Image: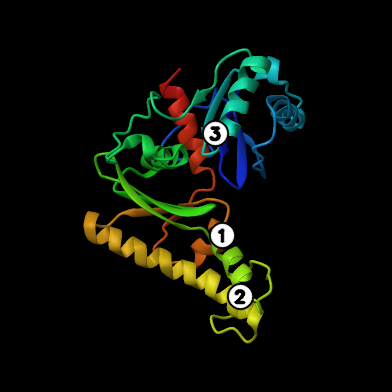
Amino acid sequence: MLLAIDTGNTQTVVGLYDQSHEPNGRKADSGLIDHWRVATNAERTEDEYALMVQEFLAFHGLSMREDVDGLAISSGVPAVTVALRAMARRYLGFDAVVLGPGVRSGMPVLYDNPHEVGADRIANAVGAHDLYGGPAIVVDFGTATTFDVISSAGEYMGGAIIPGVEISMEALFQRAALLRRVELVEPRSVIGRNTMESVQSGVVYGYASLVDGMVARIEDEIGEAVVIATGGLAPLIAPHTRAVDRHEPWLTLHGLRLVYEMNT
């Protein structure tokens, strides 16, 4: 079994893969047995991570030591990366494959400094190219909303980074004294009939329009591309865009799995 762990600033996603199912360019969830999403906590120790993962595996009657023979990690939180590396050595008995400098991704990175590109963005690009080829644009609705561009030749070209939906909402509520926090759901119409609906409309339809505008500008430079949405808030925003062609909730995990296969 392979564990694929993607740690973002807000949430961490854990995927469990049956490696007897070969990854392919048709389904991101091929071989994905189960998945779990938890809050990212940089204070967790390797022992706490081991306990958490073992509890997840117990749902399927599995054991870390006996059933897990691979671990792939992408992480944007250095303290968590250190803890997960230590967990692998102590509880699994081997080193994890951590996506970053020195790890093969099979994808040329055209950034001025390739080391600046977040591991999750590379995993998204690798997964998107495997599933859809190129040119492609990945829109990841996470702590930040990121746009990653893959060329027809399978190169990571770069992209754009925008404050995420939840960050923007938090800033709004902190700076506007008369606005209260609202539930992040689809409003009943674009024209809000009260303050709560007005905020919901601005967030949902505003970010959808932002995605459409950014994709149009990117396609002005690279030509028509397949647009893939992923990330925790993709199910809320992507259906209201005109540009998004596919929703792939496990795109990052799929890319991590592919990178693991290249390096073992």
- At 43% from the left and 42% from the top, the residue drawn is 121
Determine the image quadrant of residue 241.
Answer: bottom left
Q: Please tell me whether residue 19 is drawn above or below residue 177 in the rendered image.
A: above
User: Secondary structure beneath disc 3?
Assistant: helix
Find disc 2 in the rendering and name its residue. 176
Q: Are marks 2 and 1 in contact (CB under 8 Å)?
A: no
Three-letter amino acid code at the position of disc 3: Pro
Three-letter amino acid code at the position of disc 1: Ile
- Which badge, 3 or 1, comes first in the chain's sequence? 3
Give percent across and percent down for residue 119. Answer: 45, 37
Q: Does residue 264 appear left or right of residue 186 in this picture?
A: left
- At 69% from the left and 16% from the top, the residue drawn is 65
Find disc 1 in the rendering and name its residue. 167
Give percent across and percent down for residue 185. Answer: 63, 68
User: Secondary structure beneath disc 2?
Assistant: loop
User: Secondary structure beneath disc 1?
Assistant: helix
Disc 3 to disc 2, how far (Cα)? 33 Å
Find disc 3 in the rendering and name its residue. 78
